[in-house]
Amino acid sequence: MSTKRRRGHDRKRRHDGADSHTRRRRRRTKTPAVPPPRPSPRVFCHICVQNHWTVECPRLRAHPEDHPLMDRKRGCWKCAQRGHTAEQCPMRKFLCRECGGVHDTKECAFDYVGKEWHEFFDPVTRHLFYTNAEDTEAQWLAPTHELDVVLWLCPHCQVMIPSKYQECVQCHRVRPQSAPTDDDESSSSSASDSSSGLGSDRDNGAVNRDSSSDYETFD
């Protein structure tokens, strides 16, 4: 009886030990870490400025002693620094859309040309002028001096061409003429009248000379 009791006691103790070992293993196992998402093409590493997260940088994995402030295992997967989550990461490195530098576009220190284009018409010279501004509205004053180069717009190619060319340099279409106004019609009519008057005087003079010559030959 004592032997059977001892065997049962040993079997129970082994079973309890297995349960405690299982509980210890369960305590030690942790939930697998969620891998960081794939970085967008506009995200750059803080070490080598390549398109990957800082914790995945080959330099950090090969020589972690060169970057003591960064932790590849427990650090933020954006900057590899401890003390905050990836959502609260204050360090960012993006490619600037304006100058191409590795910083946020809002923090760009370089001035850039506005992308809002405005068109203005000068009634005196009857030319179109274009200007760009950062605002959606812009003010423009017609120039008081004569411009060195006057451009005209090809309606087919939408290209500005110097006035010395009478056809488009791309589609070779002839430069379109502006519709005549009342002032142009009056000036053209006066010019035609003056030219017709000169022509009639010339004709009369020619007739008189011919008649005089006829009289001379007749005598």
Image (cartoon, rainbow, N blue to C red):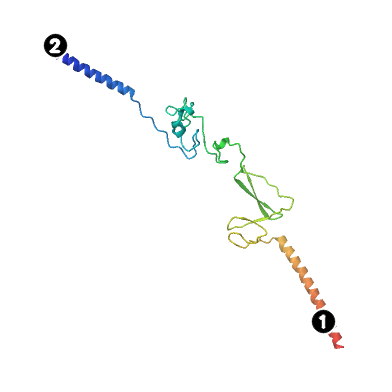
Q: Amino acid at mark 1?
A: Asp
Residue 190: quadrant of the picture: bottom right
Above or below for 14 versus 142: above
Where residue 101 sits, quadrant-wise, is top right
Cα gap from disc 2 to disc 1, whole angstroms = 166 Å
Mark 2 highlights which residue? Answer: 2
**Discs 2/1, front:** 2
Residue 57 visible in rendering: no
Residue at image point 83% right, 80% down:
209
- Give neighbour class at mark 1: few <14, some 14-19, many 20+ (Cα, 10 Å): few
* Residue 23 spot, x, y in % from top left: 29, 21
Element under disc 2: helix
Please state if 132 lies on the left or on the right of 83 as rendered.
right
* Residue at 56%, 36% in the rendered image: 106
Residue 214 is at least partly visible in this image: yes
Please provide percent x and percent y for residue 19: 25, 20
Q: Residues within 10 Å of mark 2 (few under 14, many from 20)?
A: few
Callout 2, which amino acid?
Answer: Ser
